[in-house]
Amino acid sequence: MRISVVGLGKLGVPLATVLADRGHQVTGIDVRPDVVDAVNAGRSPVEEPGLAELLERSRPRLQATTDVAAVDSAEATFIVVPTPSLESGRFSNRLVLDAIASVGAALERGGAYHVVAVTSTVAPMSMEKEIQPALERASGRTVGDSVGLCYNPLFIALGNVIHDLTHPDLVLIGESDPRAGAAIEAIHRSFISERSQVRRMNCINAEITKLAVNTFVTTKISYANMLAELCERLPGADVDVVTGAVGLDRRVGASYLKGALGYGGPCFPRDNAALAAVAADVGANAELARATDAVNRHQLARLAQLVRARLVPAANRVGVLGLSYKTDTHVVDDSPGLMLANRLAGDGIAVTVFDPAANQAARPLLTRSIAVAPSLAACLDASDVVVVTVPWTAFREIPRLLAARPRRPLVIVDCWRLFDRASLDGLAELVHVGRSPADTTVALRS
């Protein structure tokens, strides 16, 4: 099938590459010439595990251009452009509408049936009130006749995009009509696993579902973090024991039920705000979404307080290990580690940071007084209290690095429980987030 993908960003490039890898003829379209040149040269313009190899393999069936008129030669178009959040929490559809206007103008010149899928996350009623009228105006066609329109957001996590595209739990399709929905479903069936579930519905239900999935996941995260704080204050309590049992109940489930840090990233924080804003617009009560967001914001203050409690005048340097919002990505949007570093530095504390992938991305967002360490060992050497905010595999080297250097007092605040008593015995004082201090401290041998 001939497919165009408008927007070659963190999701657009992987989507175009996966489609080409599964045999489709794909044209990627982007306004940035450097991005287009990179794709045409077989170089990935975005960092994502496995993408470079897949792009090289797919080159014969993937080309890129800055000319949106290329959609006229395709049978389907996916629009994957940003929908930035406004101060109100609502999404801006400006870039989507610009893309729709350009795609529609290109389709005005031809008469063959074409289906347009909006993959960008939009708020409920956007498809019906803004996007469909814009497509019909620009193309001179009627949606449901010679042009189809679908809302097709994807559920992916940066660092796992290729896997999440090809092995999703859910493919969500909001359709203007059955013909359009069937066309988009057929495209997904060509690259998803047999176990993946496809759900087709009208656009308003799909718009709500996209926000509902992410806000439900964040509610589980905030609930687990509430339990973690409770466990920290009760002797003998352990959040992993509690959530491990709670997650066995099929009504609850274990995924995302781990007490640690607040959620971050480019989707979770803004989707809660967007759901609350939409609910306010129609007079619905969205206090649960607001409460989830409030609990999440509280996690930064909670962790900062825990760190400050471990500082003494003679040992008051803090190292923050982890600046990306999660493992396997350099993305730092709403990163708990980055926000913690800035908060502590704002309190006048000497802070050094390190991340295996995100040092460069985080540097412009860090307070100027914060030192960026070139290595894990350098961050450890510059710190009296170290906070592990992202469970990078590389951080499991900490016991080995500590064992190889002269002994000195060090506190490790382990937000993800990467280490146990045995691994740090005699090397550092260990503090686990989510466990009562009496059960987590490892005394440092003199």
Image: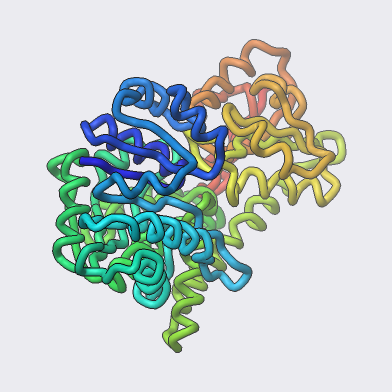
Residue 219: percent from left, percent from top: 42, 63
**Residue situated in front as seen by the camera: 197 or 350:** 197
User: For the view shown, which residue lies furthest in the top direction?
Assistant: 404
Q: In this view, does 326 lie above or below 55?
A: below
The quadrant holding residue 104 is: bottom left
**How is the rendered protein coloured?**
rainbow
Residue 313 as seen in the image, left or right of residue 420: right
Compared with 337, 123 (above or below) is: below
Residue 384: image location, x then y, percent:
75, 32
* Residue 353 placement: quadrant: top right
Nearest the viewer among 131 and 298 is: 131
Residue 409 visible here: yes
Decide if residue 72 is on the left or right side of residue 177.
right
Total marks shown come to 0
Q: Which residue is drawn at 42% across and 24% down?
A: 52
Residue sitting at x 28%, y 63% = 149
Instruction: Assign the N terminus to one quadrant of the image.
Output: top left
Asked if one can make out residue 446 in the rendered structure from this viewpoint, the answer is no
Which quarter of the figure is the C terminus placed in?
Answer: top right
Q: Position of residue 214 (x, y in %)?
A: 39, 59
Residue closer to the observer: 326 or 2: 2
Farthest residue, direction front: 109
Q: Determine the residue positioned at 43% across, 69% down.
A: 123
Q: Position of residue 292 (x, y in %)?
A: 49, 67
Image position of 27 (left or right of 363): left
- Residue shown at 35% from the left, 48% from the top: 71
